[in-house]
Image (cartoon, rainbow, N blue to C red):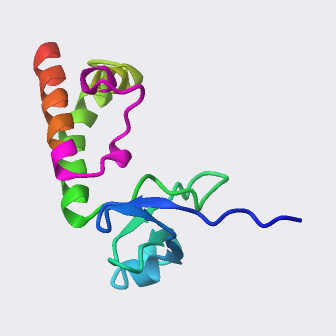
Amino acid sequence: MPRAPALRLWCCGCNAEVAPRLTDGREIYPHRDDLASLPFWRCDACRNFVGCHHKTKDRTRPLGCIPTPEVKNARQHIHRILDPIWKAGRMPRGKVYAQIASRLGVEEYHTAEIRSVEEARRVYRAVREIAQEIA
């Protein structure tokens, strides 16, 4: 039987597709016992990592590309504006994401696929516009 191809992910730190290593929270967050058993994909070249869809059947499926700390911070900043829009019922989540995609000129949008701080800035502007329009 042929072997499945190794997982390849975009690494924002290496600015390239890499073959990450599956590890767990004991390595990524050694001070957080509550995260010890969770799966993570780590790029050994730059030491950045991404979490997984651990609450699903495919618990080692990566959440997105491997961010740098700066990209991760930018993504979190976007979510602080984005999430209250759909959580408060001001607009359905899918519609918010569709509007972001439309404003960015892409077919589909997901925050976990942001690859650079510059890209995050474009997303941030789009999210701010949406928030202002529905305020």
Task: Residue 2 in the image: state x and y as whole percent.
Answer: 83, 64
**Up-down relation of residue 1 to residue 111 (above or below):** below
In this view of the protein, which residue sits in the foreground, 85 or 23? 23
73 with respect to 23 (left or right): left
Task: Residue 9 in the image: state x and y as whole percent.
Answer: 47, 59
**Up-down relation of residue 131 to residue 35 (above or below):** above
In this view of the protein, which residue sits in the foreground, 108 or 58? 108
Task: Residue 53 in the image: state x and y as whole percent.
Answer: 53, 54
Q: At 40% from the left edge and 55% from the top edge, which residue is drawn?
A: 65
Instruction: Specify the farthest residue to the front.
Output: 16
- Figure disc tally: 0
**Up-down relation of residue 52 to residue 78 (above or below):** below
Magenta stretch encompasses residue 113: yes
Instruction: Specify the farthest residue to the right.
Output: 1
Magenta stretch encompasses residue 61: no
**Up-down relation of residue 78 to residue 3 (above or below):** above
Task: Residue 116 in the image: state x and y as whole percent.
Answer: 23, 52
Write down the region rendered in magenta. Answer: 101-119
Quarter of the image with the C terminus is top left
Q: At 36% from the left edge and 22% from the top edge, which residue is drawn?
A: 98
Q: Which quadrant of the figure has residue 68?
A: bottom left
Q: At 41% from the left edge and 25% from the top edge, which residue is drawn?
A: 107
Quarter of the image with the N terminus is bottom right
Q: At 33% from the left edge and 42% from the top edge, which residue is drawn?
A: 111
83 with respect to 131 (left or right): right
